[in-house]
């Protein structure tokens, strides 16, 4: 009883301290390290849960997600001129419940949501639907949309953490939601036929058993076949811009392929390839998986399989995981294996070209294309940070932007590019640096890097802070 009361007091104290720290947050470039010869500055401030920027017609468009905004401020698009002056607000309350990515293309804005891709007029804010009812109803949703060669490309995340509908995060909603794509209560949707191992997981004090890729409370025997379909969850997809319902599979077997970026055609190693940043599994829910790193993949466009939910970062989920050689992190005594989902892997696994730290949440990214900015051909990736599930020894792996350099003929070097001088999210350290960088985008001329910072978040209560989001600008001195 005393321990429980003490825990409640500590929890309340933490929430009060977190809230006061967030209220006191003021962006300060002197609290951020960038390489010699570069400077960083807060360019846009006072934003509410921003997810990214895009550029068109001499203007900057910022997507505010509306994600759990304390004031219930809806998703919207804020428009600024190139000097940072606010011009107008578009489509407030007319977007999906969450706006998760924004891309300007051919005179229109494309905004991704929970299970939609919407098209927005950049002048009037008029909204039309490109795609809806995409199979992404759960924990992870639709990535920022990319365009190339007459096609639009996007990622769809998994409904669950590791394949099982449970009681964590979106689980209670999924248990009641009928997925119009399957006609069943919502569950992960494979892209190809899979055979299940027969394992199931208990929730609600052992009262309910659920198998992977099945609705909540439904079990399946060993060898049960779940039919694949396209569109599917945990995938990267594409469709012709002029026929968006003709959806094609690029690759599958991702958990949350949230970061997409095309390399330049002149890239000496990648030659225009599509890169995908994938968020690894968490130690949570009915099927917790330890030490699953975030990953960087090349999308093959051949329907290649990348392993989720049984393989991530060269590691099989059934192994006792804690290999510093592979992930750069050691979990220690809490490392343990999980039971396999597949009776047999549906296809050979195509491995990542790089891994990022566990619970770093590698998200939005972009390539440097201008020699005057420097580091041409290198990829810059935002690291949002953990969201309440990371072990104590892995909670400071992010809150930064990293640089990925590609070696010839193969291999990568990952180094820090922009980091807080004091590790950790700024609102918790009392500093004015990064909180949760969620996107990186270069200006159309490639001379400036814009880093979107979601702002302070109480990760345990899933509570962001209104008006504390920032877009940072990095340039050469």
Image (cartoon, rainbow, N blue to C red):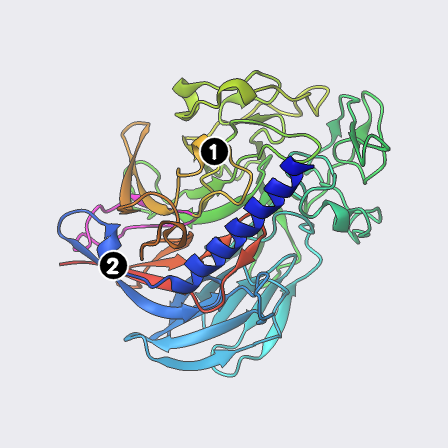
Which residue is disc 1 drawn over? 392
At 36% from the left and 49% from the top, the residue drawn is 429
Q: Up-down: is 283 above or below 447?
A: above
Q: Are marks 1 and 2 in contact (CB under 8 Å)?
A: no
In the rendered structure, the answer to whether residue 167 lies left or right of residue 100 reads: right
Q: Is residue 287 visible to the viewer in this orientation of the structure? A: yes
Residue 371, image x, y percentages: 18, 52
Q: Quadrant of the C terminus?
A: bottom left
Residue neighbourhood size for the residue with mark 2, other residues' Cα within 10 Å, grouped as few (<14), some (14–19), many (≥20) = some
Q: Up-down: is 388 above or below 308?
A: below
Tell me the SS state at disc 1: helix
- What residue range appears in magenta? 364-383
In the rendered structure, the answer to whether residue 249 lies left or right of residue 229 reads: left
At 33% from the left and 47% from the top, the residue drawn is 265
Q: Magenta includes 377?
A: yes
Q: Quadrant of the N terminus?
A: top right
Q: Up-down: is 109 above or below 402?
A: below
The circle drawn on residue 371 is none
Q: Magenta includes 4?
A: no
Tell me the SS state at disc 2: helix
Q: Up-down: is 329 above or below 401?
A: above
Which residue is disc 2 drawn over? 29
Which one is nearer the viewer's eye here, 237 or 43? Answer: 43
Which one is nearer the viewer's eye here, 13 or 415? Answer: 13
- Sequence-wise, the earlier of marks 1 and 2 is 2
């Amino acid at each position: 009883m005393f321990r429980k009361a003490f825990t409640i007091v500590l929890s309340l104290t933490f929430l009060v301290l977190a809230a006061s720290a967030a209220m006191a947050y003021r962006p300060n470039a002197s609290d951020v390290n960038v390489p010699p010869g570069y400077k960083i500055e807060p360019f846009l401030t006072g934003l509410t849960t921003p997810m990214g920027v895009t550029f068109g017609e001499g203007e900057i468009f910022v997507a505010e997600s509306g994600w759990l905004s304390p004031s219930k401020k809806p998703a919207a698009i804020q428009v600024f001129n190139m000097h940072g002056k606010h011009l107008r607000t578009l489509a407030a309350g007319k977007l999906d419940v969450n706006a998760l990515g924004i891309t300007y293309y051919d005179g229109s804005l494309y905004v991704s949501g929970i299970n939609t891709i919407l098209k927005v007029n950049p002048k009037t804010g008029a909204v039309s639907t490109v795609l809806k009812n995409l199979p992404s109803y759960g924990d992870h949703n639709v990535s920022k949309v990319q365009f190339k060669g007459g096609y639009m490309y996007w990622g769809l995340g998994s409904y669950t953490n590791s394949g099982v509908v449970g009681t964590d995060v979106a689980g209670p909603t999924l248990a009641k939601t009928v997925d119009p794509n399957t006609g069943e209560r919502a569950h992960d949707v494979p892209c190809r036929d899979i055979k299940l191992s027969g394992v199931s997981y208990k929730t609600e004090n052992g009262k309910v058993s659920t198998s992977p890729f099945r609705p909540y409370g439904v079990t399946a025997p060993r060898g049960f076949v779940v039919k694949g379909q396209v569109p599917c969850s945990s995938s990267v997809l594409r469709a012709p811009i002029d026929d968006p319902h003709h959806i094609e599979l690029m690759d599958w077997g991702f958990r949350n392929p949230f970061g997409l970026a095309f390399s330049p055609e002149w890239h000496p190693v990648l030659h225009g390839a599509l890169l995908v940043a994938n968020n690894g599994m968490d130690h949570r829910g009915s099927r917790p998986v330890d030490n699953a790193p975030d990953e960087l993949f090349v999308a093959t466009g051949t329907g290649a399989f990348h392993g989720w939910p049984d393989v991530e970062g060269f590691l099989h989920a059934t192994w006792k995981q804690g290999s510093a050689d592979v992930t750069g992190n050691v979990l220690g005594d809490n490392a343990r294996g999980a039971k396999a989902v597949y009776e047999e892997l549906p296809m050979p696994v195509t491995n990542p070209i790089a891994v990022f730290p566990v619970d770093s949440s590698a998200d939005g990214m972009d390539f440097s294309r201008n020699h005057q900015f420097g580091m041409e051909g290198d990829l810059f990736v935002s690291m949002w940070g953990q969201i309440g599930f990371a072990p104590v020894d892995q909670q400071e792996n992010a809150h930064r932007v990293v640089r990925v350099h590609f070696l010839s003929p193969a291999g990568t070097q990952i180094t820090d590019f922009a980091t807080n001088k004091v590790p950790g999210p700024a609102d918790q350290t009392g500093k004015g640096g990064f909180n949760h960088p969620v996107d990186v985008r270069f200006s159309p001329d490639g001379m400036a890097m814009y880093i979107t910072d979601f702002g302070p978040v109480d990760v345990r209560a899933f509570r962001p802070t209104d008006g504390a989001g920032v877009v940072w600008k990095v340039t050469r001195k």
